[in-house]
Image (cartoon, grey):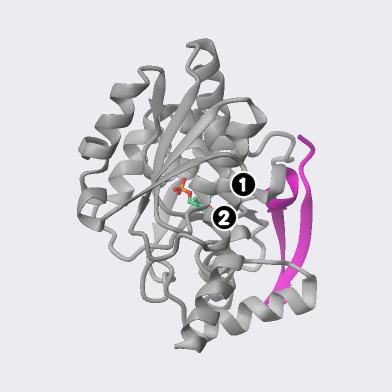
Amino acid sequence: MNPVIQSISLHRHEVDVLRLDLMTPQGIGNKYYKLKENIKAAKQKGVDTLLSFGGPFSNHIHALALTGKQHGLATIGIIRGDEDKDNPTLKAAGQHGMQLYFVSRTEYREKEQGTRVAELLHRNNSIIVLPEGGTNPLAVQGCASILDGVHSAYNHIMLAVGTGGTMAGVLAGISPSTRLTGVAVLKGEDTLTDKIRELAARNDHNNWNNSFGHHEGGYARTSPELIERLKSWYDEYQLPTDPVYTGKLVLAAERMIRSGAVPGNEKLLLIHTGGLQGLDGWMYMEEKKALR
Ligand SMILES: *Cc1c(COP(=O)(O)O)cnc(C)c1O
């Protein structure tokens, strides 16, 4: 895949953005890379169905439904809660042929052991189960090719981090002299760094760290500043970002440039991991709030 790179200016510092959203089918971004080796493995094993888990706005669920359809594999989504059955994410997943099962938050907590999953596995013994968010060793392997074709003149690369699977894969594709910063979109730093270290095992040159100060209140939480900046990057550069992942990435980069944490001579690449389908879900929630 030819890299698509856009240059923007953040606080008068020129920054490149690797637009995975423009390089992957329907903008599924990093989820394309996380799924590709899993799909290959499923085909090799003769498996016909992929099952996974997610919240009602999950980019992973949306990407799994689309990718499964493209490869002729059946997909099953176990969704947390049933209050948003008709939101744009799940509607699209359903249109791609995904079978959706809605389970209570209590059952969702025990996902893999839940009665619904046990039932489905019993009925069809040719199912591969992918974890919530899609991170497993094959996903990490797939993400190692995210930087394929990108020239190596960057001293610093940044990306948004949820489970850390994508970051662990990207680590494998960079030289030890390139710095990698993950921008955590969830609150709570207790286990993330250890998890990435474990996933990256062989590629850990200690050239990376996570930045925990830009989640704006936690997963899917926002601040007025985030929303204001996200609109202005779009107006100025036609760079679309979402408030859950890539918006927080660009916000973190801008703040780090302003504070000097990213020095003026540093050549910085931001990885746009996609996730723009989430914007439809965002507007859906805003409308729902406005109607209440
Ligand atoms: C899922 C997702 C991430 C997080 O990926 P992890 O591998 O879980 O860290 C980042 N950005 C976008 C747009 C995503 O959809």
- SS assignment at label 2: helix
Percent from the top left, x then y, of residue 54? Answer: 40, 50
The dot on residue 95 is: 1
Residue 184 or residue 23, whichever sits in front: 23
The answer to whether 292 is drawn above or below residue 34 in the figure is below
The magenta segment:
1-23
Crowd tier of the residue under label 2, counting other residues whose Cα lies within 10 Å: few below 14, some 14–19, many 20 or above = some
- SS assignment at label 1: helix
- Amino acid type, label 2: Lys
Q: Which residue is mark 2?
A: 91
Percent from the top left, x then y, of residue 64? Answer: 54, 39
Tell whether position 12 is magenta: yes
| Residue plotted at (33% across, 30% down) | 120
State if disc 2 and disc 1 touch (CB < 8 Å): yes
The answer to whether 110 is drawn above or below residue 118 in the figure is below
Tell me: is circle 1 under 8 Å from ligand 1.
no
Residue 235 or residue 102, whichever sits in front: 102
Is any atom of residue 153 visible in this view? no
Percent from the top left, x then y, of residue 95? Answer: 62, 46
In the figure, residue 203 lies in which quadrant? Answer: top left
| Residue plotted at (28% across, 44% down) | 194
- Amino acid type, label 1: Gln
